[in-house]
Amino acid sequence: MNRITVLLAEDHEIVREGFRCLLKHESDIEVVGEAETGRQAVQLTQKLRPAVVVMDIAMPLLNGLEATRQIRKTCPDTRVLILSAHSDDAYIEQVEALGAAGFLIKQTSSHVLATAIREIQKGTKFFSPAISKRMRVRSPKLTGGGKSSRTATNRLSSREVEVLQLIAEGKPNKQVAAELGVSFKTIDKHRQHLMSKLNIHDIAGLTRYAISAGIIESSVQVTIL
């Protein structure tokens, strides 16, 4: 029997351990790798080519949504199952637009995870029961609340999203350059392009934008607000 290979992308070790222990008892599922950051998730997916990536949205260095976009572009055969503590409609809409195969809220009972992995590996989309119920009855206008900031984010390149997240996490340009392996001047240009595209002209504004667009969570960066 061919086992379903899975990569766990979650920055909290205790949560990853819980997922790993849960899936260990599933005879048809094998965890082949674990990632602590979104960037590491992309790199390991390209290396290991798992059937399914279980991806937390709130990941450091590269958030789970942007990591999903990169994985879908470079490894189209890998299915991505999004995990989040939040389930607002704007998040769900963006997850669908990115081509993720499913969305689970972390409050979902643990046995649903294995079921979701099996379903999306077969080509079926899978959403937490509470989300599925809401999707069946919601109107197209329901997602309007977060639409403007998320639409603007779609105009940004993958590298610009990475730079935006690192800046919003409070990292200075020099550290951002080191994280991405580019020069200080390159990061400064990316920052200028971000401000021009988004019509935002200070770091605090970029941070507020990153929070509203779901690039970082509000608890990640509070020092400059």
Image: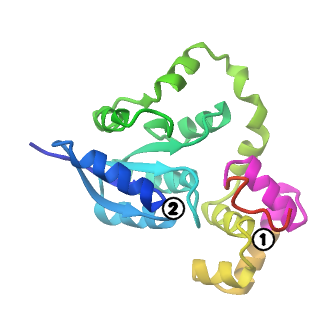
Mark carried by residue 32: none
- Quadrant location of the N terminus? top left
Amino acid under label 2? Answer: Gly
Q: Answer yes or no: do the residues labelled 2 and 1 have beta carbons within 8 Å? A: no
N-term-proximal mark, 2 vs 1: 2
Few, some or many residues within 10 Å of mark 2 (<14, 14–19, 20+): many
The residue that mark 1 highlights is: 191
The foreground one among 89 and 26 is: 26
Q: Picture coordinates of residue 21 (x, y %)?
A: 29, 51
- Nearest to the observer: residue 112 or residue 64: 112
Q: Magenta segment, principal secondary structure?
A: helix
Is residue 33 visible in this depiction of the protein? yes
152 versus 178 height, above or below: above
Quarter-of-image position of residue 7: bottom left
Q: Is residue 176 magenta?
A: no
Name the residue at the left extreme.
Answer: 1
**Where does residue 45 sit, x and y in percent of width and height?**
37, 60
In space, the residues marked 2 and 1 are separated at their CA atoms by 20 Å
Q: Which mark is on residue 38?
A: 2
Q: Give the residue type at disc 1.
A: Arg
Judged left or right of residue 174, residue 36 is left
Secondary structure of the residue carrying tag 2 is: helix
At which x and y percent is residue 80? 42, 45
SS of the residue under disc 1: helix
Q: How is the image coloured?
A: rainbow
Q: Is 223 drawn above or below residue 187 in the view shown?
A: above
- Image quarter hosting the C terminus: bottom right
Which range of residues does the magenta coloring cover? 193-215
Q: Pick the residue in front: 61 or 149.
A: 61
